[in-house]
Image (spheres, rainbow, N blue to C red):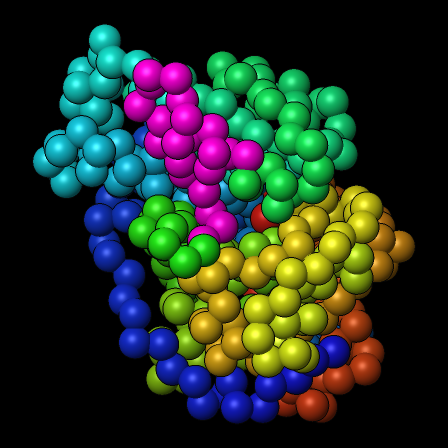
Amino acid sequence: MYHNPTARTFRSTSSIAPAVLDFHKTLPSYAATPLLRLPNTFSTSLGLSSVFLKDESNRFGLPAFKILGAPWACYRTIIKKLALSPTASLQDIAAAARGREIRFHAATDGNFGRAVARMAGTVGVESRIYVPRIMVEETKRLIGSEGAEVVVAGGDYNDAVKTAAQGAEEDNGRLGLLVQDDAWEGYEEVPQWVVDGYSSMMLEIDEQMHDAVEKSPDMVVVPVGVGSLAQAVVVHFKSKDQSPMVVTVEPDTAACLKTSLEAGHRVTIETGDTNMCGMNCGSVSFLAWPYLRDGVDASVTVTDEESSRALQTLRDMGISTGPCSAGTLAALLKVCERDSSTLGLTAASNVVILGTEGPR
């Protein structure tokens, strides 16, 4: 475990725009996803008061949280490109796009690309989604089922990102719009919109925790891919006077954040295979890095075996989720077993783990 004791005093000065949640409420079938309380006997066995899982296994009918960030970024991107009102409705956008050859481009490990494709269909534009060479056929099929053209890039996720950026720039007469959650120097605005989109989840957690225990969590455990969701967690929860600890989790074969934190600067790594494929990313977002460097209290890696055991534990509790979600529980188990005193966990502590996906 990487531990940053100075993160306890880090405070975010960023604020959440109410327009984000207002926008999400205009999308079909909006509802807050459940905050599931794990059995008290389980929490007690870990030396904790309570453990909650934020269940993103069904968000707008898709099996992952990405449908919060991708639509907001698509919405803001197309509004800016077509010079529409910042309060334009989805119907306004569809009308403005009609008759124009517009296409969204995005790279993905699976769920983000599917969410971009869903939004493209909602406003009546095309989408081309780029995927790594190693991706299961069913994931590609699901992305294609949203009406997207699926393009297999020649290498890993980082290669898919580069190919998507090139594809948007050279789109053969179409208006190519790159919508990516990864950020790099010169490409920061759209990834920030993705992060802003995840803020709705944080506001839901605030309300649900108040209803459940009348207080904020003492720790939030979040999975890391390129770091956009983790950035949203740090930005929101580290803005509070009594801010919770933020613990991140990655596969041991794709620990780009932990490697970067240990090095003191962003490091791009070569990733291996993992069942937690939503976190199989080799570099931390340029935009997320400063927040994660300063605001993450601890960075933990877990193995596929540890994730699989945690997945079975959740199934035994009647919770159906995916490997990335189980990774957060695996990280919490590891922290409670080895490092609970380091992070100040006690029998009064309330922990939220983010269950970011449904069953694969």
**Which of 46/143 is in front?**
143
Q: Is residue 119 above or below residue 328?
A: above
Q: Residue at x 75, y 84 (%)?
A: 339
Q: Quadrant of the C terminus?
A: top right
Left or right, 225 with respect to 9, comes to right
Left or right, 89 with respect to 27, comes to left
Give residue 100's position: percent from left, percent from top: 25, 13
Q: Which quarter of the figure has residue 175?
A: top left
Q: Which residue is farthest top?
A: 99
Q: Residue at x 23, y 9 (%)?
A: 99
Query: Is residue 267 something one can see in this rendering?
Result: yes
Give residue 77's position: percent from left, percent from top: 28, 38
**Which of 87/52 is in front?**
87
Instruction: Check residue 47 for magenta coloring.
Output: no
Give residue 158's position: percent from left, percent from top: 62, 46
**Which of 219/14 is in front?**
14
Q: Residue at x 79, y 57 (%)?
A: 253
Instruction: Check residue 176 for magenta coloring.
Output: yes
Q: Which residues are magenta?
A: 163-183
